Amino acid sequence: MAEQSHSGGIAEHLQYWSYSFDDSNPFMQIHLDTMLLTLFIATGMISFAIWLRGKLVAGAPTGVQNFMESVIDFINQTVKDNFPVYNPLVAPLAMTIFVFILMCNSLDILPAYLMHHVAGAFGLHTFRQVPTNDLNLPAAMAVSVFLLVLYYEFKLKPGHFVKELLLQPFASLLLDSKNPVVKLLGVLLIPLNLTLKLIEELAKPLSLSFRLFGNMFAGEVIFLLIASLLLSDSFSDIASAGGIVSEGMGLLVGLGWSLFHMFIGLLQAFIFMILSVVYLSIAHQPAEH
């Protein structure tokens, strides 16, 4: 019974609290749990920043100010090591991405079924507790970074970007030839160059979003499997010796996975941040002549 109950719980836990505009179209819906939690995290970040601003003191920092200055120094140094020029937007953007994703990932530390049961007390049958487990959020952040990269590509080197889009990697060599037949072949290769360049550019937001989503989603599923296989479903199951052993193993395995997954969440936040900085760095690199 316990296994069957948890199995149903896993299936229910992986459903979103959503509002559908058109039941026949799965894309015409909003995941309200993701929206609510991201709004809560963003509000918390802004409130914390306002609170910390009023606590800043000159001289040697202590406590929270000391910790935040260490984080900011780390972000600034990371940007400086990977960004060729100065842009006042990049370091704050990197800081925001890192902290926001880390806060979203940290919600996975909560017990597997906790938020689901809390939501059930308010009449909600489905609720996902980690926003980055919803592909819509990583995809939205990745597309935002991608659009910013395109903006700087067109702003800083529009001619070079269009040339790369149409003439790389094959046609530029052929167009430099003095042979008219080779030049014609180079022109004919432009659609192939464009296709390859578009695939290369679209791979950037896809890799950013699916890497974050895949790691966090897999971690949540493993949490649920640990809970369903090793944790008892009722107090009567715990009363036996086998139940006590199973419960103890479940708590130890769950604790171990929680610690490991905390590191994974931190690592994924850093990877998303550093790749965003690298992509923006490529957009700022001067055109080669």
Image (spheres, rainbow, N blue to C red):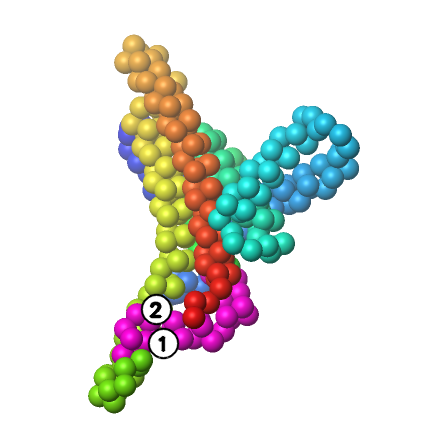
Frontmost residue, 74 versus 123? 74
Instruction: Please report the residue visible at 60 percent of the width from the left and 33 percent of the height from the top.
Output: 70
Q: Are marks 1 and 2 in contact (CB under 8 Å)?
A: yes
Q: In the image, is 144 to the left or to the right of 225?
A: right
Query: In the figure, 161 relative to 132: above or below?
Result: below
Which of 105/114 is in front? 105
Rate crowding at label 2 as few (under 14), some (14 to 19) or many (20 or more) other CA atoms within 10 Å.
Answer: some
Instruction: Please name the residue shown 25% across and 89% down the image.
Output: 180
Determine the secondary structure under disc 2: helix
Q: Give the magenta-colored segment's residue range.
A: 146-174
For badge 2, the amino acid type reads Lys
- Numbered mark located on residue 166 in the image: 1
Q: CA distance from mark 1 to mark 2?
A: 8 Å
Residue 188, x across and y down, in percent: 26, 83
Amino acid bearing label 1: Leu
Residue 42 position within the rendered picture, expressed as x and y whole percent measured from the top left = 60, 46
Q: Residue at x 28, y 33 (%)?
A: 4
Residue at horizontal 69 percent and vertical 26 percent from the top: 62
95 part of magenta stretch: no
Residue 267 location in percent, x, y? 43, 38
Q: Nearer the viewer, residue 174 or 122?
A: 174
Say which residue label 2 marks: 197
For the question of whether residue 20 can be seen, the reply is: no
